[in-house]
Amino acid sequence: IEALKHGGLKNRVTVNIKLIDSQDVETRGVEILKDLDAILIPGGFGYRGVEGKIATARYARENNIPYLGICLGMQVALIEFA
């Protein structure tokens, strides 16, 4: 989170970070993502929330929202696309 804020400062833009639990995407749907300008899915482990991460990656792709997947975040993007 701090790296994103520092990157914003360097580029003279405000970075507003909204933390969303991937399990909330599973239960409430992708509507909770509608106001986002970009999506970052970090690394993780285990199966908890993976379906929500896949749905988020799909939402980003289908709505042309910039997406950065780190480790598991990139893996779920590939799973979603395949």
Image (cartoon, rainbow, N blue to C red):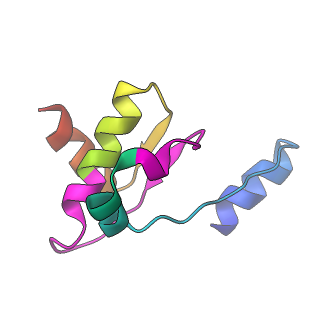
The answer to which of 9 and 65 lies nearer the viewer is 65
The stretch of residues the image draws in magenta is 31-53
Residue at left offset 62%, top offset 66%: 1
* Left or right side of 8 for 38: left
Residue 63 drawn above or below residue 67: above
The answer to which of 44 and 36 lies nearer the viewer is 36
Residue 9 lies in the magenta stretch:
no
* Left or right side of 67 for 23: left
Residue at left offset 33%, top offset 52%: 29
Q: Whole-percent x and y of residue 56?
A: 34, 47
Place residue 26 in its image quadrant.
bottom left
Residue 36 lies in the magenta stretch:
yes
Q: Whole-percent x and y of residue 23?
A: 30, 68
Residue at left offset 69%, top offset 68%: 2
Q: Whole-percent x and y of residue 12?
A: 88, 43
Residue sticking out furthest to the left: 82
